[in-house]
Amino acid sequence: MRCSRISNKLCIIGASSKSDGKGFAMNRRDFFKHSAAGAAGVWAASAHPATASPKELPNILWITCEDIGPHLRCFGDSFAVTPHLDQLAAEGVRYTHAFSHAPVCAPARSGLITGIYPTSLGSHHMRSKAPLPSFVRCFTHYLREHGYCCSNNSKEDYNFDKPEDSWDESSRKAHWRNRTPGQPFFSVFNLTTTHEGQIRLSDDEFAERTRDLQPHERHAPEQTPIPPYHPDTPEFRKDWAQYHDLITVMDKEAGALLDALARDGLAENTIVFFFSDHGAGMSRCKRWLYDSGLHVPLIIRFPEKYRAMASAAPGAALDRLVGFVDFGPTVLSLAGVPIPEVMQGRAFLGPQAAAPRQYVYAGRDRMDERYDCVRAVRDARYKYIRNLMPHLSRGQFQEYMYHMPSMQAWARLAKEGRLEGAPALFMQDTKPVEELYDLEKDPHEVNNLAADPRHGETLARMRAALADWMRETHDLGLLPESEMHIRAQYSPYYALGKGRSFYELARDPNDYPLASLLAITGIADGAWPGEESLLAGLSHQDAAVRYWAILGLTQQPGEKPAWLEAVETRLGDPSPAVRCAAAALLHQIGHEGALNVLIRELKNSGEWVRLQAANIVDLMGPAARPALETFRRLLDDDNQYVVRVARHAVEMLEKADAS
């Protein structure tokens, strides 16, 4: 394969996130007017990057790995054995405050490759296929238009079908060596060695996976540090030790790539990034909005000829806040390529670098088969978390997560009532509505300050920052997944055969009344509104508002609550998401017909309706016995996540029958 420049015709790009979000076309003059690229030092020969000599352009290499936090010696982890990455850090700059916007791979990669938050694209649920609007492209599209060869080896996992013009090559054979001689490249190598699934290999498989480690490079479980939020058990010690062993293996792989770059004579022409896709692949880390799930190591090395674009001298550490949506714009800035206005990230290097961020943001939504909705905002010192489904336990069963021996041990200790202190928090039946942490004093986020009046001003400021971000980015997390698909499919646009993306749907107030949704969930206030407002929400014209009104009432139980009759009417709601939510709430207070409503929804033609209903019924425990036969039929469902919930429910109910 030889890379070649794609058509130099400028693409259609989208409006700024501050506009109405509809796409628009820009001509060449307008496009470059919004960029400082013509003034960049590397583009001094030409005001139009596409005509510059390729030898003037920096090559850019991304070495990415999976499921690790900043557990490298160069980031202060004395237990780490990472000599190659430590050397890269000595030659480059460490960013000590770099964060993913999602604690799991696919939503994280969605924002990395587009520069747009997954909550704006509708790609926020784990393993989903969001339709992209025509004016959104992977940032590699713009690099290719300006002469770069773009290769990816090999993971994509973007939560959307990538446009065909995203890569010159994306495969396990993709390499910078496959480009046209002399052509500048952007090359990605995804190292999968440290993935969560590798930690829990069998002993024989793990020995084979780590066969190249010398005795002094291995990590003894008895010496392994255990974070305070985990119970100190043999299972956790073994899993954490193996996590560190895999990082050392990955360090060797990264070193081999850097050696290959040097052997090819390209090190002095290539800017190198190293980072992980989110935090550590351990329970309460991956999938959660604590720093343990979002904080990533980021190292950037500039060769001498491009060092003027570096933000500090080699070996330095910077505490500038950096988010994943900033990475794509930063690469474009370094390459002298204009940053499309539709991108929500901001460059932190190069001629188009923006002012430093005050905040980074993150979201947790459906994680494989289990629903949740959590948002977070972090500044240099504090983290604020808003749990919109506080009735769901952090430790609810999730099949893939529960394959981990340490997670199984944690659940067993919880069942036996043997947890106390910080390790008990994760396994509690419910979550607090709000969490606030002082990360300087409490880096592991185990001391929730949300109810401490001494931090009232900080709490209010962080609440407001989160509400502003959700409003400005048109956060789609307040639209139930089934509703999101229904509204995109049955829209006037669809009837005309044009279709509509979730991104565009979110910017139509008729289909997504964001102001009303922010009000009914009390995002700016940190709590749901009072019962009177929630009751009014039950009759709102929009189903999503009715849905969240019911979830708000879930926090106000009673033996015979005033809302009983109003919620009963929602069992016949036109929206399946509302019907499911109403049935879930009514079942909590012993309503006899609620389970039958949910069993009907288990047979719904909409896969995301079936998944919502399955989650609700599965959480009922033995009381779900009338749904057993329906769950058995769902073991053959087309949706793998419905199958996972059904499998758990069948096993639970059959075990209850046998006892």
Image (cartoon, grey):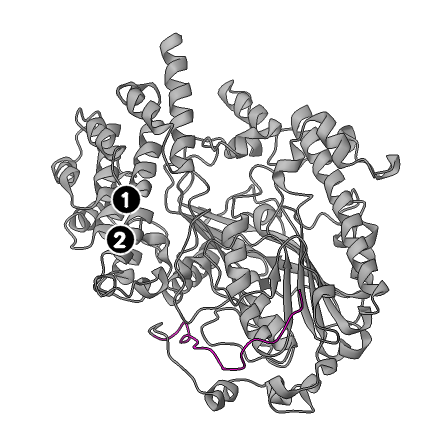
At a point 70% along the width and 84% down the height, the residue shown is 42
Q: Amino acid at mark 2?
A: Ile
* Left or right: 420, with 234 as reference point: left
Nearest the camera: 61 or 263? Answer: 263
* Whether residue 327 is situated above or below residue 610 in the rendered picture: below
Quadrant of the image containing the C terminus: top left
Tell which of 450 and 604 is nearer to you: 604
Vertical relation: 108 (above or below) 9:
above
Q: Is residue 540 magenta?
A: no
Q: Nearer the viewer, residue 456 or 585?
A: 585
Query: Residue 547: x percent and y percent?
Result: 25, 46
User: Do residues under tags 2 and 1 come within 8 Å of each other at their CB atoms?
Assistant: yes
Residue at numbered disc 1:
552
| Residue 22 occupies quadrant | bottom left
Which percent across, then down, holds residue 101?
52, 56
Mark 2 lies on residue:
520
**Image quadrant where residue 603 sits:** top left
Q: Is residue 10 magenta?
A: yes
Residue at position x 44%, y 63% in the image = 465
Considering only vertical position in the picture, is 110 above or below 316?
above
Q: In the image, is 560 to the left or to the right of 214?
A: left
Q: In the shown orientation, is residue 330 left or right of residue 553?
A: right
What's the residue type where badge 1 is placed?
Answer: Gly
Which element type, helix, strand or loop, lies under badge 2?
Answer: helix
Q: Which residues are magenta?
A: 1-19
Label 1 neighbourhood size at 10 Å, few (<14), some (14-19), many (20+)? many
Residue 610, which numbered label? none
